[in-house]
Amino acid sequence: MQIANNDSVKLEIANLYKLAFPCIQQALESEDTRNEIVAVQQRLLTYKEVLLHGNMLEDKELKQAFSALNQSEKGVVQGGNQNINDAIKQMDEIIERYSRKTKINKQAYQQV
């Protein structure tokens, strides 16, 4: 999935996926967009797991998991588990929706 050169798609994602967009904005510029979005999801899921077991962990471990996040991701997790769930779901939708669009565009280009 490469959408870095398509500003209208980035704008569409920014408007439709307000929670996920700040977390994946850099990934949208990448040559490896899909894998970078999945990496963001994994960091969010890891932090969520740490939160769920926070009462059994030391503060040091919670702080370490939090420090692994970038500023946008920190903003999402500070909103709680529902925010984390919603952001991950939005990223899943982005991957599904825009991976399909890219494949269609590549096929159309090859037929020309």
Image: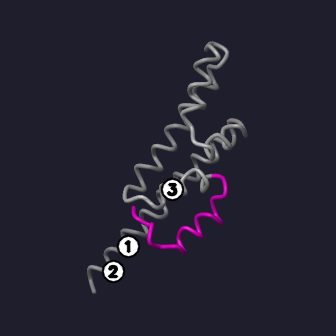
Is 85 situated left or right of 24 in this image?
right
Contact (Cβ within 8 Å) of mark 2 with mark 1: yes
The residue wearing badge 2 is: 108
Magenta residues, as a range? 1-19
In space, the residues marked 3 and 2 are separated at their CA atoms by 27 Å
Residue depicted at x 49% and y 38%: 42
- Tag 2: residue type? Ala
In space, the residues marked 3 and 1 are separated at their CA atoms by 24 Å
Which residue is more in the foreground, 9 or 90?
9
Q: Quadrant of the N terminus?
A: bottom left
Which residue is more in the foreground, 28 or 49?
28
Is 69 situated left or right of 99 in this image?
right
- Tag 1: residue type? Ile
Is 29 situated left or right of 87 in this image?
left
- Tag 3: residue type? Gln
Q: Could you say where residue 98 lies in the image, as x and y percent from the top left?
A: 47, 64
In the image, residue 93 sits, relative to residue 107, either above or below, namely: above
The residue wearing badge 3 is: 26
Q: Secondary structure at mark 2?
A: helix
Q: Residue furthest bottom?
A: 112
The residue wearing badge 1 is: 104
